[in-house]
Image (cartoon, rainbow, N blue to C red):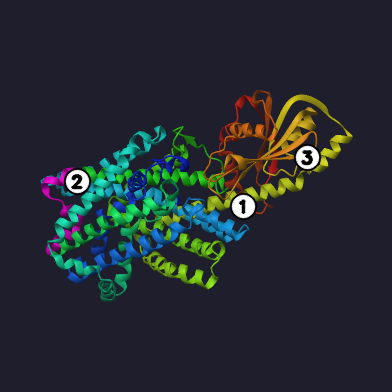
Amino acid sequence: MSEPTTSAAETHEDASHAKSEGFWALALGSVGVVFGDIGTSPLYAMREALAHSRSGGTEELAVFGVVSLVTWALILIVTLKYVIFLLQADNKGEGGTLALMALARRSLGRRSGAVFFLGMIGAALFYSDGIITPALSVLSAVEGLKVAPGLGSALTPFVLPVSAGILIALFMVQSRGTASMAKFFGPITVLWFLTLAGLGVFHIFDDPRILIGLSPHYGVLFLLDNGFLGFVILGSVFLAVTGAEALYADMGHFGKGPIRAAWAGLVLPALLLNYLGQGALVLANPEARLNPFYEMVPEVAFWPVLVLATAATVIASQAVISGAFSVTQQAVQLGLLPRIDIRRTSETLAGQIYVPQVNMLLLAGVLALLAMFQNSSNLAAAYGIAVTGSMFVDTLLFFVIIGALWKRPWWQAALAAGFFAVIDLTFVSSNLLKIPQGAWFPLVLGGALVIIMWTWTRGAQILTDKTRRDSVQLTELTEILKARAPHRAPGTAIFLTSDPDVAPVALMHNLKHNKVLHEKNVILTVKTTETPRVKDEDRIKIEPVNEDFKKVTVAYGFMESPNLPKALGLCRKLGLKFDIMATSFFLGRRSVVPAAQSGMPLWQDRLFIYLMRNAANPTDFFKIPPGRVVELGTQVTV
């Protein structure tokens, strides 16, 4: 999905700078980031689809049928659904499942639990995709060693170690940022697509009859001829469109126009030519079905193409890893996950972030997949369900957008979204048949992540409700303080709280135990909007309570990283001045213990407590100077 993004475009600067770049420079950049995943599909998609058809794929109808199905999958799913329709459903220029979820909730004008849950599912499936994509794409490229001219059998034992080494190196460099390498992503991937097109054109003449495979009726005939097996084959055909969700997820970094131009002008023609070339080759030489891509490559060009294919899969993997970092940032800001250590690796590139915990979990997952599945054919069975599920979530959210945001009649929304939902469900059902072969992995991983996100959001809500019930309203506290004035301390105290209407725990403890009140007191709330970014002029809202207290709300978009000292500097323009070195930040640290009578089962209480204890320190997360922070704790049952 990819979420997200989403996500994946750490190769470009923020939107304001992106607008100043040339149209074709953005189109070139999008080729390296947006289309890396779908661009590596020719390595395995045709091979897997032919391997499952009758007679091992040697029948002419099988070749014509698979080429037809792949062609129309690219047209209906990628071109029609994503390039034409979903790119129109942007959230202030941003895309991805979580951006779509936030847009749907905003367009409904209320907090919809169903829409929020769909966002959880989409994010969970994106993480599954983020683990499988690097393993599958890099392994499928390195498997070219098995057919290396004169060396294939000798190099076969090295495929897994070489793949693991490349992936370990890729994850290890994430902490340093990839800005220095990013400028090569676009040109290398363009060269890859030109190579795909060239190989395709070269082999179409092996049997020009392959061109009739462009007709959709050959796909229908093939499915009817194979019966139930044809339905199973659809799961393999879908491998040709994996990565389509990146079109939408990375919209904010490149814009609709450059992405559409790159797809129509280079990517789609190159993919179609390559699949036609693979089909013609198999018609002329049925044995080539075992590995049609590498059988296309002339012996003299084998090693350069192998190196280029490996580079292309590394770039595709990098885009997915960056997307996982971006989706994590969005999920934290939208309240789906606890605070996580998010680091910027560049002062100038907005997309350049690094999330150590996510990076290590992805690496562990990728290496586990290599150990479990051993080859790309086995991994391909696990791949489709994560992507098809994510695409189906996008379709359901798109239904809400059509009706609530675009104000179309609901029957029109159902008709438009229903067309794509039927396609999505067909592919989802086909991929579900592969559960015994590996599709169980993304389902188990996605389910575990949904449980984690649901536990976090539910636990946080229970904790908020309990705190509100046990707290004193801020207006009541101000009346009490008028009657019994406490000792005054010089300077300013800022109390962070998620609920500005009640007296923060840290404030109550300061009054109760220290028996002091600062000269100036600010009740500070950080709010995440359902838009990607917030303008500086809209970031701060100040509401006076009385002479002693002011409420300050700082708003951030779900794609922004909070920086409270920087935000508070904006208060000067609104008449509220801070000397950061004479200001104390008071944080309430809650020690949570499980209670059998709470709103969640005991195991879920314990999971929530574990997530809380391992959340990033708010001092670091909000970029508060550590020397200015005072933490006051309390124990809460949940």
Real-space Cα separation, disc 3 to disc 2, in angstroms: 68 Å
- Residue indicated by mark 3: 545
The one nearer the camera, 598 or 180, is 180
Q: Secondary structure at mark 1?
A: helix
The residue at the point 68 percent across, 23 percent down is 582
Residue corresponding to mark 2: 305
Q: Nearer the viewer, residue 245 or 621?
A: 245
**Measured Cα–Cα span from mark 1 to mark 3:** 31 Å
Work out whether residue 371 can be spotted: no
Secondary structure mostly seen in the magenta stretch: helix
Highlighted range, magenta: 284-304
Q: Earlier in the sequence, mark 1 or mark 3?
A: 1
User: On the image, which quarter does residue 332 sit in?
Assistant: top right
Residue closer to the observer: 559 or 261: 261
> Residue 499: x, y in percent?
70, 44
Image spot of residue 635 (x, y percent): 70, 39
Local crowd size for mark 2, using a 10 Å CA cut-off: few (<14), some (14–19), many (≥20): some
Q: Which residue is mark 1?
A: 458
Q: Looking at the picture, which amino acid does disc 3 mark?
A: Val
Query: Is 63 placed left or right of 386 in the picture?
Result: left
Magenta region includes residue 237: no
